Image (cartoon, rainbow, N blue to C red):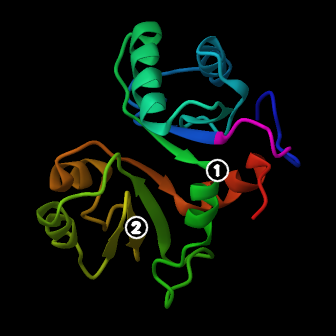
Amino acid sequence: MGSRTGGARSADAAPRWVAFLRAVNVGGRTVRMEELRGHFEALGYANVATFIASGNVIFDTRDAERTLEATIEKQLAKVLGFETAVFVRSAAALVDIARTQAFPDVRSGGGGPTHYVAFLRDRPAAAAVRRVMALCSATDELRVDGREVWWLCRGSMRESTVSGARLEKALGSPVTVRNLNTIVRLVPRLGVTS
């Protein structure tokens, strides 16, 4: 996993964050997780750890969320040689996301539907929400809630007409998509209680 596995956090500890990187370790954009941790540590962030190899980085800092996204993107473009969009969420926000039942009448897993969450930078405008909702089909159900788009895929990805690229086109802004199971598995590693 990385240099920290979680556990109880003291009240005076710096806030815990997770950065979700778009398009890392796909399409020839290979980054070793050890290298990625080093880049975050070079920015002065503490207790840096990675979770699976898709660009999920846990770290502590007192910097503001908006500052984090811009700072990390600039640093990674410089050291990796390519740009990658970064979406930062607080540990508390991820706990809420992991608990959200965006599609309460549908259970996923065990060969059933798959739940995904797409992270956005900002709340989308009403027109963008309408474009996202127009992507719904018998296979794909979507819901927009704040800075997340929830996606329920009732079939295989081959049957789906939704993708990260289609969501980006509808929204007019970058997104990164994670399987909700990844978020659920990541949360215990954050060392937060609620």
74 sits left or right of 164 in the view:
right
- Residue at the (46%, 62%) spot, across then down: 116
Q: Does the magenta stretch include residue 14?
A: yes
Q: Which residue is drawn at 48% across and 38% down?
A: 65
Circle on res. 150: 2
Q: Mark 1 points at which residue?
A: 91
Task: Specify the quadrant that holds the C terminus.
Answer: bottom right
Judging from the image, what secondary structure is the residue with disc 1 in? helix
Residue 23 in the image: above or below residue 9: above
Where 102 falls versus 30 (above or below)? below
Using the rendered image of the protein, determine whether residue 37 is visible from the camera's viewpoint: yes
> Magenta segment, principal secondary structure?
loop
Q: Nearer the viewer, residue 155 or 124?
A: 124
Q: Considering depth in this image, is 132 or 30 the residue closer to the camera?
A: 132
Q: What residue type is labelled 1?
A: Ala
Query: In the rendered structure, which segment of residues is drawn in magenta?
Result: 10-16
Rendering quarter of residue 160: bottom left
